[in-house]
Structures are given as C-alpha cells and as structure tokens.
C-alpha cells in the first residue's frame, strides 16, 4: 500500500510506499520533545515528494547530519532527510499522516537526550 501525508497548509504533500507503521519512535531529545515528533524511518526510495518542494525550508543542529524539513508557510515539519548505515532515509512524522490512527500505533521511547 501507499500512505500520504502533508503539512498543515497543504503546500507540502508526500507519499510513502509501504504499510503504515505499527510502532513509531518517540524521542526525548531537545528537538523531538519540543515538536512532539512521532517518527518512522523508511528508505529514501520509498518516499515521494508530491508537491511543495519550493516551500520547504530546512533546519540542522548538533552534528548537522539530518536535514529537518519544514514548510515555510505553516511551519509544520512533516519529514526529515538523513542516513542510516550509509543509506539515505526519510524520517516520517506520522502526525502528518491523516490516515494514521495515533491511538493505535505503539510508541517506542528513544532516549535521544542521552545520545
Ligand atoms: Zn504548510
């Protein structure tokens, strides 16, 4: 299957090949806790940006290896671009996927604050 997500104003839309995750990462680092991210990681090849490339801004911090993408219009941060084991990945903010039932997806705590 494929699922779709968007920023709040709708300028940025994306789709992800694959099933909705049964669990997501909830991290307590200084960045994630402020933005309330619930994340799932997918290979970059399964991610398609449908619209909004021209509206996307980016934010990097710490080691600057992850590009946290956000909509310059509404400020929503629907996904991030990074690498895992040398392969490009996308971190999907599942809160931006309207069809995801957030009450039924298991939250896996990640102690990012200690990394
Ligand atoms: Zn937006």
Image (spheres, helix red, strand yellow):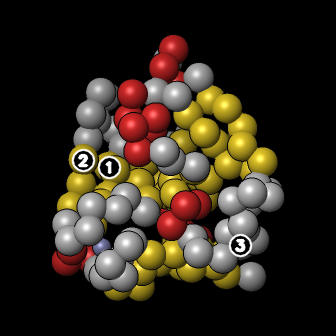
Q: Position of residue 21 (x, y in %)?
A: 73, 60
What number is the disc on residue 67? Answer: 1
**N-term mark: 3 or 1:** 3
Disc 3: which residue: 18
Q: Residues within 10 Å of mark 1 (few under 14, many from 20)?
A: some
Residue that numbered label 2 is attached to? 59
User: Horizontally, is 22 left or right of 33 in the view?
Assistant: right
Ligand 1 occupies quarter? bottom left
Q: CA distance from mark 2 to mark 1?
A: 6 Å
Relative vertical location of residue 93 with respect to residue 25 in this rendering, above or below: below
Q: Are marks 2 and 1 in contact (CB under 8 Å)?
A: yes
Q: Quadrant of residue 9?
A: bottom left
Whichever of callouts 2 and 3 sits on the residue coming sooner in the sequence is 3
User: Residue at left 51%, top 14%?
Assistant: 114
Instruction: Say what secondary structure mark 2 lies in.
Output: strand
Q: Which quarter of the figure has residue 69?
A: bottom left
Residue labelled 3 has its Cβ within 8 Å of some atom of ligand 1: no
| Left or right of residue 14, residue 111 in this image | right
Q: Position of residue 63 (x, y in %)?
A: 31, 28
Q: CA distance from mark 2 to mark 3?
A: 27 Å
Write the residue at 59% across / 75% down.
98
Count neighbours of disc 3 (C-alpha within 10 A) and say few if under 14, some if 14 to 19, many if 20 or more: few
């Amino acid at each position: 299957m494929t699922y779709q997500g968007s920023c709040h104003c709708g300028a940025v839309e994306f789709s992800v090949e694959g099933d909705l995750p049964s669990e997501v990462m909830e991290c307590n680092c200084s960045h994630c806790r402020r933005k309330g991210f619930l994340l799932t990681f997918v290979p970059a090849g399964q991610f398609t940006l449908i619209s909004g490339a021209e509206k996307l801004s980016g934010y990097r911090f710490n080691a600057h290896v992850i590009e946290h993408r956000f909509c310059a219009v509404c400020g929503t941060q629907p996904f991030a671009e990074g690498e895992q084991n040398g392969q490009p990945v996308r971190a999907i903010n599942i809160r931006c996927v309207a069809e995801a039932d957030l009450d039924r997806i298991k939250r896996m705590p990640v102690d990012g604050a200690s990394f």
